[in-house]
């Protein structure tokens, strides 16, 4: 049974039917039933949405930052009031437990709205001044870019939509946003909420569709910037398309992040961190620390504690507050992850410590869902496919090392550089190791938290630019420098000698 009414497009401040009837279904990950039918945007629809954003830009960009901030704060207030209902939608759409979506997904997005509202209202868009000499000075201003495109991901739909739209709109830009075709339900909720909060028509718009819709958006001549979250291969195509027209870009891409347990670390804390870094959100997190490096002489104890704690992974009714592990997001992704597990067993020859290919036992009405066991491989080596490639599922690889210099070198031996982390009791050692890790996001004695105040972004093949924090606002403005001469006359070399 379809749970939700058809999802329309949203531009000019209201829901819109697609110009050409074209629809696609979305599946409930927990039981593989149809969840909703979605209107797919044609090129005419996309042009209309971009035109709506273009028309709204002059007024919105001239609106004083403090007035824009009031609207964003009202939107944050509405999000918090509706946290439970929005979280239920996210659970149906993504398959993540309600215990997660109700405490992280919506509320962390509201935090980002509040952060950027406060930042622009308190002078975050102010420029700089410099006195050159008594009769001349320079000042700079930060100006909005124009119509921007946000392309969301399916693992944290509403959070990522807010990570993109909050700084974009706070800076005075307008946005056309495309949710993932796998998890589109948040799009119309957020657009309607922005309108209710006082956002003028056309400032935030939503179009639906697959890769062809994203490709047309990124290549559109009116678009000034593209912000994309997704896998590396798709990000390369998006960046290449945007570069052809010299658009601004922010790319938050994939990773194969190392989690390093130093010899003095508490084993229980290290195991807790490794479990959060591999099994939270069923492992569908780009920053996951899937390469877990453990000292040789700690391996046996680390694995013993890990096996004990794996019994606390609880699958079941996603609305049950005790459930902390859900299905994968789609059949396509389920097949991909299971393929990696099979390869790890049959080709890589890693030792299967826990989990594997057998489907877990769940409630009868969910047996057709995309459920998978948390899986742990040990006796892994750096050249194995499961160690080198991003799986984006609940699959941990345990590797051992002898020296700190060795583990740092091996941790950095990847074309990606999104995140990394260290567990230790020696905070000086932690800083020394972290300084050598080639990653844009690092954690010490924790894993995964990304507050609004913290700029996050990848190195190497893991991305371009950052999101959140003060630097996240800079990604949505362009600089203008002005030199003012107050001397009363214009100096010139073209004068009478």
Image (cartoon, grey):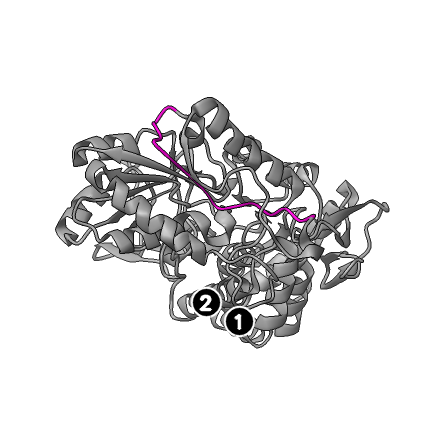
Q: Residue 392 or 142: which is nearer the viewer?
A: 392
Q: Which mark is residue 21?
A: none
- The span shown in magenta is 368-383
Tell me where residue 389 appears, x and y as whole percent: 45, 31
x 31%, y 34%: residue: 399
Q: Badge 1 is on which residue?
A: 76
Secondary structure found at label 2? helix
| Labelled pair 2, 1 in contact (Cβ < 8 Å) | yes
Image quadrant where one finds the N terminus: bottom right
Instruction: Give the left or right position of residue 181, taking residue 351 as reference.
Output: right
Q: Residue 240 or 431: which is nearer the viewer?
A: 431
x 16%, y 34%: residue: 403
Q: Residue 484 or 457: which is nearer the viewer?
A: 457
Does 382 appear in magenta? Answer: yes
Q: Is residue 481 visible?
A: no
Which one is earlier in the sequence, the residue at label 2 or at label 1?
Answer: 1
Main SS, magenta region, reads loop
**Badge 1 density bin: few <14, some 14–19, many ≥20, Cα 10 Å:** many
Tell me where residue 372 appears, x and y as whole percent: 56, 45
Q: Badge 2 is on which residue?
A: 111
x 66%, y 64%: residue: 189
Tell me where residue 124 appears, x and y as whole percent: 38, 63
Up/down of 34 relative to 239, above or below:
below
Tell me where residue 118 appears, x and y as whole percent: 42, 70
Instruction: Give the left or right position of residue 422, taking residue 263 as reference.
Output: right
């Amino acid at each position: 049974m379809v749970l939700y009414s058809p999802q329309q497009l949203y531009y000019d401040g209201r829901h819109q039917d697609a110009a050409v009837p074209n629809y696609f279904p979305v599946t409930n990950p927990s039981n593989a039933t149809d969840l909703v039918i979605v209107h797919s945007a044609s090129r005419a629809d996309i042009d209309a949405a971009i035109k709506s954003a273009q028309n709204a830009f002059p007024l919105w960009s001239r609106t004083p930052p403090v007035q824009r901030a009031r609207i964003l704060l009202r939107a944050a207030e509405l999000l918090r009031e509706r946290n439970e209902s929005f979280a239920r939608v996210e659970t149906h759409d993504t398959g993540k437990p309600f215990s997660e979506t109700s405490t992280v997904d919506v509320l962390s997005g509201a935090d980002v709205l509040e952060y950027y509202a406060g930042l622009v209202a308190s002078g975050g868009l102010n420029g700089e001044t410099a006195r050159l000499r008594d009769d001349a000075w320079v000042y700079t201003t930060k100006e909005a870019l124009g119509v921007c495109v946000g392309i969301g991901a399916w693992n944290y739909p509403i959070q990522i939509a807010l990570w993109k739209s909050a700084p974009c709109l706070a800076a005075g830009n307008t946005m056309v946003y495309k949710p993932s075709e796998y998890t589109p339900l948040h799009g119309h909720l957020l657009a309607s909420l922005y309108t209710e909060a006082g956002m003028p028509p056309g400032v935030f718009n939503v179009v639906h569709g697959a890769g062809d819709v994203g490709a047309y958006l990124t290549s559109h001549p009116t678009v000034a910037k593209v912000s994309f979250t997704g896998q590396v291969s798709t990000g390369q195509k998006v960046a290449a398309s945007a570069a052809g027209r010299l658009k601004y870009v922010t790319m938050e891409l994939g990773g194969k992040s190392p989690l390093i347990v130093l010899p003095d670390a508490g084993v229980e804390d290290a195991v807790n961190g490794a479990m959060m870094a591999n099994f939270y959100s069923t492992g569908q997190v780009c920053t996951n620390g899937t390469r877990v490096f453990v000292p040789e002489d700690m391996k046996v104890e680390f694995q013993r504690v890990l096996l004990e704690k794996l019994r606390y992974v609880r699958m079941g009714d996603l609305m049950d507050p005790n459930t902390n592990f859900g299905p994968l997001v789609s059949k396509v992704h389920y097949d991909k992850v299971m393929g990696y597990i099979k390869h790890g067993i049959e080709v890589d020859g890693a030792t299967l410590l826990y989990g594997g290919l057998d489907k877990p036992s769940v409630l009868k009405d969910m047996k057709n869902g995309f459920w998978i066991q948390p899986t742990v491989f040990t006796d892994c080596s750096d050249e194995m496919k499961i160690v080198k490639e991003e799986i984006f599922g609940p699959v941990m690889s345990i590797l051992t090392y002898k020296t700190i210099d060795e583990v740092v070198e091996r941790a950095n031996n990847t074309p990606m550089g999104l995140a990394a982390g260290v567990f230790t009791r020696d905070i000086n050692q932690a800083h020394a190791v972290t300084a050598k890790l080639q990653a844009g996001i690092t954690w010490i004695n924790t894993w995964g938290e990304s507050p609004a105040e913290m700029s996050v972004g990848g190195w190497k093949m893991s991305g371009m630019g950052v999101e959140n924090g003060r630097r996240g606002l800079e990604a949505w403005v362009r600089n203008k420098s002005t030199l003012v001469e107050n001397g009363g006359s214009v100096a010139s070399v073209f004068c009478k000698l």
